[in-house]
Structures are given as structure tokens and as C-alpha cells.
Image (cartoon, rainbow, N blue to C red):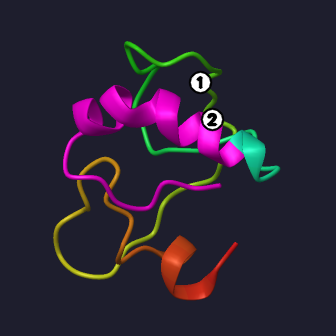
Amino acid sequence: MQLVYCRNTADYVRCAGAIGRFLVRHGKPVVILDANGPVPGLTGIYTEKRGRKYFKGRTPPSLIDLTETELVLYGS
């Protein structure tokens, strides 16, 4: 699963346990999110192996706001 939008990283960190348990019960044990480094409060692996992010518009999207990026517009 890919987290496409969240107002604030802290909001996701606060709810990550409940979201993770729900997703595991439905066969989706991993959530990928946009970050510049390891996220404090989350267990997981940080990697830069994913490619560049392309977006539509003049200003780059904030972290965890991928609503106007190629990932959402074209799929991956």
C-alpha cells in the first residue's frame, strides 16, 4: 500500500499501529510513504532506491502529499 496524502507525518505516526493491524488482516503488510529519511516513531526500512518524483505544477508537493504526482496520475 502507498500512502498518497496525509496532512502531517505526525498524524500518520499516531495512527500507524491501527492502520497497520487493519491492513495485515487484509493481506497488505507493508505501507510505503514519502520521506526524506527514517521517520521517528515508525518501524521500517528507509531506502532511496525508488526513482525520482515528478509532479504537476510550479511548486513541489510537501512530504506525504503525492496527489498531483505521476504515481497517482499514471499509476506505478
Query: Looking at the picture, does residue 53 appear above or below residue 17?
Result: below
Identified at 62% across, 35% down, the residue is 21
Q: Is residue 3 magenta?
A: yes
Identified at 29% across, 53% down, the residue is 6
* Distance CA(mark 1)–CA(mark 2): 20 Å
> Residue 13 at x, y = what percent?
36, 28
Q: Is residue 38 left or right of residue 2?
A: left
Instruction: Report the magenta residues as a range.
Output: 1-23
Mark found first going from the N terminus, 1 or 2: 2
* Quarter of the rendering containing residue 48: top right
> Residue 28 at x, y = what percent?
76, 49
Q: Residues within 10 Å of mark 2 (few under 14, many from 20)?
A: few
| Marks 1,2: beta carbons within 8 A | no
Query: Looking at the picture, does residue 68 appear above or below residue 15?
Result: below
Tell me which secondary structure the magenta stretch mostly adopts: helix
> Residue 23 at x, y = what percent?
66, 47
Q: Is residue 64 left or right of residue 10?
A: right
Q: Which residue is mark 1?
A: 46
Q: Residues within 10 Å of mark 1 (few under 14, many from 20)?
A: some
Badge number at residue 21: 2
- Split into 4 quadrants, where in the image is the C terminus? bottom right
Q: In front: mark 1 or mark 2?
A: 2
- Split into 4 quadrants, where in the image is the N terminus? bottom right
In the picture as drawn, the residue positioned furthest to the right comes out as 27
Identified at 62% across, 20% down, the residue is 44
Going by the numbered disc 1, the residue's amino acid type is Tyr
In the picture as drawn, the residue positioned furthest to the bottom comes out as 74
Badge number at residue 27: none
Secondary element under disc 1, as helix, strand or loop, is loop
Identified at 50% across, 27% down, the residue is 17
Q: Is residue 19 left or right of residue 69?
A: right
